[in-house]
Image (tube, helix red, strand yellow):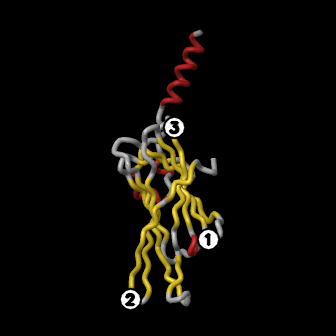
Amino acid sequence: MRALFSALLVAAVIVTSPVRADRDALPTMLQPYAAALTEVPRALARQGAIYVPAYSTLSAIAGLTKVNFAVTLSIRNPSATRTLVVRRIAFFNTIGEELQVYLTQPVGLRPFGTVNLFIPVQDQRGGAGGNFLVEWAAEAGAPDLLVEAIMLGEMGGSSFSFVSRGLEIGAARWQ
C-alpha cells in the first residue's frame, strides 16, 4: 500500500511539474529571445495552426523584373497573464514544399513576449508564394497567438515594406 501511494505521489509530481525550455538547446534563431521564453504549461486545452504568407520575391514593372524581400516572422503573445506555447515553425515554398523546420520542440512564450525569425533578402527559396505554418497551444481562456510576416525590399532608389497577418487554419496537421 505504501509503495502504491509513493508511486502515485511521484506520478502526480511528474504530471503537474512544468516543463522548462532548455535555453542551451534553443535553435539559434530563438537564442536572442531567450528572456521572452518561459516554462511550458502542462494543462494545454487549446491548439491551432496559423498560416502566414511570406513573400521572398514579387514581380514588378509589368513582370519584367523582380523585387526581393527580407522576411521577419514575428510571433507574439497578446495575453497579459497567460503563457502561450509555440510548438512548431515550418517554412514552405510557392508550390507547398516544406523547405525548413525552424522549431520542433515546444517553447513557452511569456505574457506579451515576442520572438522573431529572420530570412535575409538573399534567401529566395520561398518565392512569391512562400509561407510559414506556426503551430501553437494554450491554456483554457488564453487568446490566440498573433503572427505576422514583415517584408522589406528595395529596387533602384525605392524601398518597399508591407505586413502579412497570419490566418488561423485550425488544429495542427503534424503531431
- Position of the N terminus, as image quadrant, is top right
Residue occupying image coordinates x 51% and y 41%: 46
Residue carrying label 1:
94
Tag 3–tag 1 contact (CB < 8 Å): no
Residue carrying label 3:
45
Residue carrying label 2:
157
Residue type at the position of mark 3? Ala
Whichever of labels 3 and 1 marks the residue nearer the N terminus, that label is 3
Q: Is residue 93 visible?
A: yes
Q: Residue 134: x, y in percent?
A: 53, 55
Whichever of labels 3 and 2 marks the residue nearer the N terminus, that label is 3
Residue type at the position of mark 1? Thr
Classify 107 as above or below 51: above
Q: Residue 170: x, y in percent?
A: 56, 50
Q: Residues within 10 Å of mark 3 (few under 14, many from 20)?
A: few
Q: CA distance from mark 3 to mark 2?
A: 50 Å
Residue occupying image coordinates x 59% and y 14%: 3
Q: Residue 80: x, y in percent?
A: 34, 45
Q: CA distance from mark 1 to mark 2?
A: 28 Å
Q: Residues within 10 Å of mark 2 (few under 14, many from 20)?
A: few
Q: CA distance from mark 3 to mark 1?
A: 33 Å
Element type where label 2 sits in the image: loop
Residue type at the position of mark 2? Gly
| Label annotation for residue 137 | none
Residue occupying image coordinates x 39% and y 55%: 114
Residue occupying image coordinates x 51% and y 77%: 122
